Amino acid sequence: MKLSVIVPVYNMAADDKLTWCLNSLVGQTISDYEIIAVDDHSTDNSLTILREYEKNYPDKFKVIASPDNRKQGGAKNLGLAVAKGEWIGFIDSDDWITPDFYEKLLARAEETGADMVGCDYHLTGEHSMKIGQIVHNNTPEQSGELTVEQYRSLILDGGSLVVKIYRRHIILDYPNRFPEHIFYEDNAISNSWMLRAKHFEYIEEPLYYYYQHDTSTVHTITKTRCEDRMEAARVMVREARQFDFLKDYYPEIESSFTTLFYVNTLFSYMAGVKNKSYRFVKALGKEMKETFPGFMENKYYIQRVHEEERKLIRMQQRSTIYFMLYYKLLWSYRNLRKKMSR
């Protein structure tokens, strides 16, 4: 078997989201592949739809029904447990791909000897094959037989996991799998996978359609989602320690943790969670400082985090109460300015 594609599915039956994804998968121009669709204990009609595809495409479509809800990481782990392919790929069940997506990625791997291949993607808000907003997922400078500098670049800007395929051994020759019962599971393990690769190839072409809608993970901000992001960052650091690459790539891991655990969580929480908790914000800042005491001196932090955000973070590190009061006043002032400018 050349390729296994794992699709975690949870409540995607509405608005043809799931059928768009599955139709793009069964219509791939390669023949030697399997689709492993894992229903994560959906409460809608998703499993019924999956069973229909399994019935119609018995040679390539396999359904696993999880007895409980494990989130995407748990569903992916169930798929990995039965995957037979030399290559492993993933797709989110509300996204879709061009018919030659996997053909092009596999062909590039065969041409170059790469063990990890990726491409660009579209952002789109409609079900169509029209070109949407193109996101360059990687850079040509990251391609080739990987050097220390390229590994550093991939840790900082590795891009999305779903637009890549991986040689089987990169994932399955190691004991660790995705963290379960949380979102942001890709962030937790992607560094480990990239650092196991020896040769990465990047196709500068958007072949993946990333569907933007109101129920997308990135558009839903709750305290629980913030806690999931924090846990994913903790797992990322544990992986770096376990597989002994924290020392060699300390500034890059520190920067990645700071962004995922602290910067993104702090500002999305303050902007998106209605009933804000002083204890939550204080504990967030305290754990950040305990995990990486010198994070504010990190060169990537200084280069990549906006000056105003760094100012607010310094404030939060000194006084959570003062930070929350200041942020509330700042937010109210900006909203007032917007209303007055209409």
Image: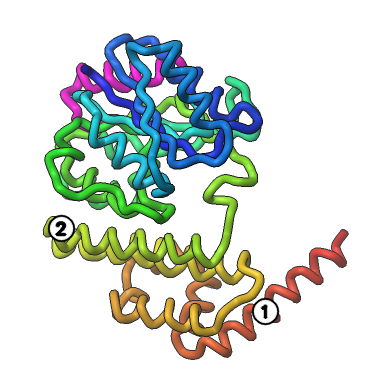
Please name whichever residue, 320 or 248, is drawn nearer the observer in this view of the structure: 320
Q: Position of residue 300 (x, y in %)?
A: 35, 63
Check disc 2 and report the residue beneath it.
Answer: 245
Q: Which residue lies at the image location 49% right of the left edge and 18% below the top edge?
A: 52
Q: Kindly indicate the quadrant of the structure image that contains residue 303.
A: bottom left
- Which residue is under mark 1? 328
Q: Residue at x 16, y 43 (%)?
A: 196
Q: Is residue 269 left or right of residue 302?
A: right
Residue at point 19%, 46% (across, down): 195
Span highlighted in magenta in the image: 98-118
Q: Amino acid at mark 1?
A: Lys
Q: CA distance from mark 1 to mark 2?
A: 40 Å
Residue 244 can be seen in this image: yes
Mark linked to residue 70: none
Q: Secondary structure at mark 1?
A: helix
Camera-side residue: 226 or 112? 226
Q: Relative to 180, does residue 276 appear above or below in the rendering? A: below
Mark 2 element type: loop
Query: In the rendering, at what x and y percent does residue 172 appear?
Result: 17, 38
Queried whether the magenta region covers residue 96, the answer comes back as no
Left/right placement of residue 6 relative to residue 321 reads: left
Up-down relation of residue 193 to residue 332 (above or below)? above
